[in-house]
Amino acid sequence: MANTADKLVIAGREFTSRLMVGTGKYASNEQMMAALEASGAEIITVAVRRINLADRGKGCLLDFIDTKKFTLLPNTAGCYTAEDAIRTCRLAREAGMSDMVKLEVLGDEKTLFPDNEELLKAARVLVKEGFTVLPYTNDDPIMAKKLEDLGCAAVMPLGAPIGSGLGIRNPYNIRIILETIKVPVIVDAGVGIASDAAIAMELGCDGVLMNTGIAGARDPIAMAEAMNLAVRAGRLAYRAGRIPKKLYATASSPIEGMVE
């Protein structure tokens, strides 16, 4: 069972689940909802640019999501300038989605790495406008600290390029980020399998956000459940405290007091 006392806190809001899940790339909205249920996630991301906010007609993604059960996290996926990202967040808030946003400002279409300069510019404006900003960034401790200093509610460093499934490529940078900042650190992008999610949590991360790792699996619903268990297991292992790594063996059974 999950430890309900060990909650994820973002800008004063408490969440029991530390797994955040995206809503794109599923074969159908019905499959998406089944995967969301299996994941146990409470926060789900929605790409604002992929929704026609002016026409909430039949089949709109938002019509399938129970907003009493799930917290929407609008994201600015597909934005390549600060101005575009800021505009997108304002549209999401005006449409009643949320003022807690996942801020993405991408640098190029090939790598989908963040544009740090534009990201800082957008974060500065959005924080001043009262948004709760969760920025997607690279695994750079200096950048993470700058985002925290601007007032971002969390920092979301990539584990690997978006959709790559390569896992946590630089755990040492993630550890430095964890030691550098005080706001929650949520690994975003690159998680491909349950062990990747567990590693992120065992490092001490506060949460994991993923989309392709679940939606792109052969069985998205089963993978969603696997990720749910992995995040919980990784967090429990982190809190339990691992044994020190040693070069040589240590007997697991005591030999003192044995009768010859």
Image (spheres, helix red, strand yellow):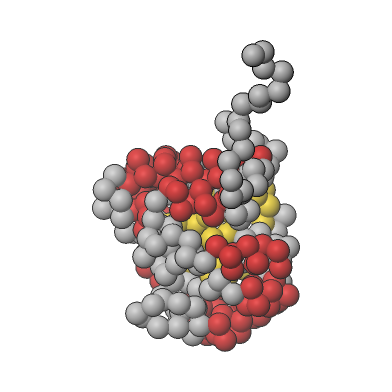
Query: In the rendered view, would you say 220 is above or below 124?
Result: above
> In front: 107, or 247?
247
Kindly tell me whether residue 102 is visible in this rendering.
Answer: no
Q: Quadrant of residue 189?
A: bottom left
Residue at horizontal 39 percent and vertical 56 percent from the top? 192
Which percent across, then down, holds residue 36? 42, 45
Q: Quadrant of the C terminus?
A: top right
Which percent across, then down, holds residue 74? 50, 64
For this view, does 240 lie left or right of residue 97?
right
Q: Quadrant of the N terminus?
A: top right
Query: In the rendered view, would you say 157 is above or below 226?
Result: below
Kindly tell me whether residue 140 is visible in this rendering.
Answer: yes
Most extreme residue toward the top, as rendered? 259
Which percent across, then down, holds residue 134? 59, 66
For this view, does 151 lie left or right of residue 23?
right
Query: In the rendered view, would you say 253 is above or below 216?
Result: above
Number of marks in the rendered image? 0
Residue at horizontal 66 percent and vertical 59 percent from the top? 184
Residue at horizontal 65 percent and vertical 47 percent from the top? 244
Which percent across, then down, holds residue 157? 55, 67
> In front: 246, or 80?
246
Q: Quadrant of residue 162?
A: bottom left
> In front: 123, or 128?
123
